């Protein structure tokens, strides 16, 4: 599971927005984001700006539309799983799967670029939408939960759970997932306060220490973690 964690942590950390109480910093952030959205020709920069504007309460339809279009493009991509999986469901290092190699060769595509898009770029496109917490994104995120790309499933589950949506579908996808991905999808059930979802998350994660670590991470995200790191 450690290798998958590294990939998750490599995704952009795009959830920090100044507190609404700090009006000067918020105004400055909004002004910079508006300029970035309007002037930049780099799609990722425009996505970041749209995300910031939505999360700060200054989002418009055009900002949501940009995130929706990028996420939908990523979710509908049909690239096969890039890596070999053994009979037990374990990913075999970075050894490419035959289906992926055939796909790349038949389309004269660069396999390294496609693998990078599968693991990093496409999930990042969905992550912007997931962490925007835009209600308009729920339908797209539900589609993302059904993706064959497990990284997209993970970030779609996060986006749905952030809005209290689809816990049963998240649990079902976690049960179906490859063993390395199962706890990283199931952890999103910890965002739901109901005891039944908490129990399901613990069952699917299968490691009490990991459950505690996930809960602490969520508490830090919410600003409710009062624990201190040991020296």
Image: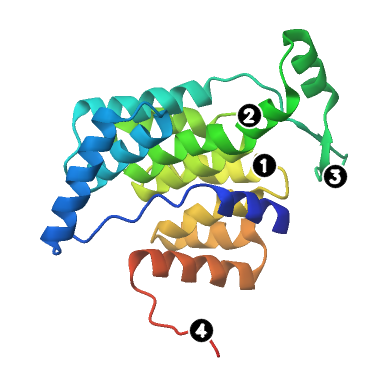
| Residue drawn at 72 percent across, 9 percent down | 107
- Which residue carries the number 2 mark? 148
Q: CA distance from mark 3 to mark 4?
A: 37 Å
Secondary structure under the numbered disc 3 in the rendered image: loop
Q: Are marks 2 and 3 in contact (CB under 8 Å)?
A: no
Q: Position of residue 106 (x, y in %)?
A: 77, 9
Residue most extreme to the right: 87
In what quadrant of the picture does the N terminus appear?
bottom right
Q: Residue at x 48, y 39 (%)?
A: 156
Q: Is residue 163 above or below residue 81?
A: below
Label 1 and label 3: CA atoms lie apart by 12 Å
- The crowding category of the residue bearing disc 3, from other C-alpha atoms within 10 Å (few below 14, some 14 to 19, many at least 20), is few
Which of labels 4 and 2 is toward the front?
4
133 or 39: nearer the eye? Answer: 39
Q: Secondary structure at mark 4?
A: loop
Mark 3 or 4: in front is: 4
Give SS at disc 1.
loop
Residue that label 3 marks: 88
Q: Where is residue 145 drawn, in percent x and y?
A: 52, 34
Q: Position of residue 118 (x, y in %)?
A: 63, 31
Compare marks 1 and 2 and give the one earlier in the sequence: 2
Q: Which of the numbered marks, if any, corresponds to residue 229?
A: 4
Judging from the image, what secondary structure is the residue with disc 2 in?
A: loop
**Which residue is label 1 attached to?**
177
Mark 3 / mark 4, whichever is N-terminal: 3
**Cα gap from disc 2 to disc 3, whole angstroms:** 18 Å
């Amino acid at each position: 599971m450690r290798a998958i964690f590294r990939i998750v942590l490599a995704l952009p950390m795009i959830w920090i927005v100044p507190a609404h109480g700090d009006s000067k910093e918020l105004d400055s952030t909004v002004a910079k984001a508006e300029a970035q959205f309007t002037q930049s020709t780099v799609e990722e920069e425009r996505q970041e700006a749209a995300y910031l504007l939505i999360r700060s309460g200054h989002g418009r339809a055009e900002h949501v539309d940009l995130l929706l279009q990028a996420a939908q493009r990523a979710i509908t991509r049909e690239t096969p799983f890039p890596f070999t999986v053994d009979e037990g469901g374990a990913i075999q290092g970075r050894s490419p799967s035959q289906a992926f190699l055939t796909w790349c060769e038949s389309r004269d595509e660069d396999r390294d670029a496609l693998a990078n898009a599968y693991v990093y770029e496409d999930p990042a496109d969905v992550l912007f939408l997931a962490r925007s917490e835009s209600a308009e994104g729920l339908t797209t995120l539900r589609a993302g939960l059904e993706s064959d790309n497990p990284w997209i499933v993970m970030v779609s589950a996060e986006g749905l759970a952030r809005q209290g949506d689809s816990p049963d579908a998240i649990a079902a996808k976690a049960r179906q997932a490859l063993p390395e991905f199962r706890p990283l999808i199931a952890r999103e059930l910890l965002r739901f306060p109901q005891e039944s979802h908490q129990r399901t998350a613990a069952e699917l994660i299968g490691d009490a220490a990991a459950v505690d670590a996930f809960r602490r991470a969520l508490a830090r995200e919410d600003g409710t973690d009062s624990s201190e790191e040991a020296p």
